[in-house]
Image: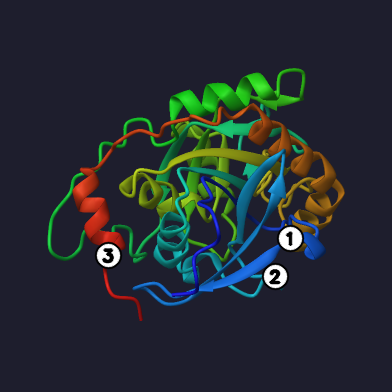
Amino acid sequence: MSPAPSRAVTVAVIGGSGLYSLFDPTHSETLRIETPYGPTEVTLGELGGRRAAFLTRHGIHHSVAPHLINYRANIWALASLGVRVILSSSAVGGVTADYPPGTLVLTDQFIDRTSGRPDTFFDQGSVQHLAAADPFAPELHDIAARALAGENIKTSGTVVVIQGPRFSTRAESLWFAAAGAHTVNMTMYPEVPLAAELNIDTVNLSFVTDSDAGLAPVPGTVDPDAVSHRLVLQRLAEAQPRIVAAIESIIRALPEEYSPRQSIDPAAVDAVLARETL
């Protein structure tokens, strides 16, 4: 594994589509961290008055598809640095009219519709059952909501996480809304429960880029906000200053002494972090 930084980093940002860098390159360092699941890169810098780690899910050239992201390597690497809090950013589609494009959402629930993704660290040596009723830490969520008061923001939202990389059919989009979802995304699972397995709290800031397959159920209906890869990247580029400012506000509001939930026996977590790296 790469040499540890001079002091522990307790806060990390995981950037989704459109967020591929976060720090001034002249005042940051990038580490290649070897993990039991393969290598990953983490950049260290300053944000919101705090030393922080940054990791981009899809790679700096958006070259890694959602179902191929090495989620376990990413989370293990952050845990090895001492990270206790992850602020994740995500691009999402809105599946109800109440979550229109341009809305920021503090996600608090997910519905998993992925398949075949390695989604636990406890697949060898011991079995640990993660309580997941509140997958996003409620205390951290409340801190973020207060930090963003006055923004055009939804302080609650259920995301359905699909396999990708294809977008939803019209029928699927309507089904998701009927099931109680507000947004749709491809990457929050298994990232969030994996972090919880290593006793890291997560708060998610999502930006609604589109209306998924289109809110009108009539085939052939043209919806200018219907999802396309080009539209997602265009709107994310336009919103990036706003997203980064929101991330910075949340980090500034985070107490130095913040203590994450102990979802898993710390001894079991230590055993995972002691595994031999590849």
Chain-order first, disc 2 or disc 3: 2
Under mark 2, the amino acid is: Ile
Mark 1, Cα crowd under 10 Å, few <14 / some 14-19 / many 20+, is: some
Q: CA distance from mark 1 to mark 3?
A: 29 Å
Query: Image height check: is 29 above or below 199?
Result: below
Q: Is residue 125 in view?
A: yes
Label 2 with label 1: CB-CB less than 8 Å:
yes
Chain-order first, disc 2 or disc 1: 1
Query: Image height check: is 87 above or below 62?
Result: above
Q: Position of residue 197 (x, y in %)?
A: 31, 48
**Quadrant into which the N terminus falls:** bottom left
Residue at numbered disc 2: 60
Q: CA distance from mark 2 to mark 3?
A: 29 Å
Under mark 3, the amino acid is: Ala
Residue occupying image coordinates x 64% and y 70%: 59
Query: Image height check: is 77 above or below 181?
Result: below
Q: Position of residue 176 (x, y in %)?
A: 49, 40
Chain-order first, disc 1 or disc 3: 1
Q: Position of residue 86 (x, y in %)?
A: 52, 45
Q: Position of residue 122 (x, y in %)?
A: 22, 58
How many marks the image carries: the answer is 3
Could you say which is closer to the camera, residue 123 or residue 182? 123
Q: Is residue 205 left or right of residue 126?
A: right
Residue at numbered disc 1: 21
Mark 2, Cα crowd under 10 Å, few <14 / some 14-19 / many 20+, is: some
User: Circle 3 — which element?
Assistant: loop
Residue at numbered disc 3: 274
Residue occupying image coordinates x 35% and y 33%: 261
Q: Nearer the viewer, mark 2 or mark 3?
A: 3
Under mark 1, the amino acid is: Ser
